[in-house]
Amino acid sequence: MKNQVYFRDNLPVLRTFPDAFVDLIYIDPPFNTGHTQKRTRIQAVSSPQGDRVGFQGKRYRTVRISQNGYQDQFDDYLAFLEPRLREAYRVLKPHGSLYFHNDYREVHYCKILLDEIFGRRSFINEIIWAYDYGARTR
């Protein structure tokens, strides 16, 4: 299981691992925005009448492959996160690192929960996305 990436609800995955098993965990939970989140997978197919223009002016038609979504709203967001973070703590090696991605709506509450589970002394730093350099939200 070396060098594996798991892209799914982390709680059932984490529960399959032994204690102190992984070096790095990145958790990107729902943000509790109160909105329905939708993700559409597309494929670009070469077509002279395509709705997209690519390299050297070649045209592509957009084909929707699938669409998934979920209601991003929790009555008790921290109760949703806590078992996942406790499992992450259990499976993380003593020298391991946890990257936890969240946004301004809940991050302050999450920091307190993380301090409770991992200890305040475990906190190293935060990374704040700077949208001024190309990665602008809509």
Image (cartoon, helix red, strand yellow):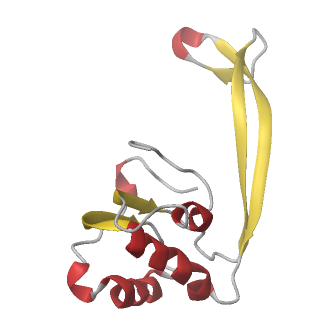
121 lies above or below 87: below
Q: Residue furthest front?
A: 18
Whether residue 127 is visible: no
Q: Horizontal placement of 4 versus 12: left or right? A: left
The picture quadrant where one finds residue 25 is: bottom left
Which quadrant of the figure contains the C terminus? bottom right
Q: Position of residue 28 (x, y in %)?
A: 51, 63
Q: Residue at x 37, y 91 (%)?
A: 116
Viewer-nearest residue: 54 or 119: 119
107 lies above or below 24: below
Q: Position of residue 65 (x, y in %)?
A: 78, 34
Q: Position of residue 104 (x, y in %)?
A: 47, 78
Q: Residue at x 24, y 72 (%)?
A: 125
Viewer-nearest residue: 73 or 118: 118
Q: Residue at x 20, y 84 (%)?
A: 121
Viewer-nearest residue: 97 or 92: 92
Number of numbered discs: 0
Whether residue 131 is visible: yes
96 lies above or below 120: above
Q: Horizontal placement of 126 versus 56: left or right? A: left
The picture quadrant where one finds residue 21 is: bottom left
Q: Position of residue 98 (x, y in %)?
A: 35, 66
Q: Residue at x 68, y 24 (%)?
A: 52
Which quadrant of the figure contains the N terminus? top left
The picture quadrant where one finds residue 81 is: bottom right
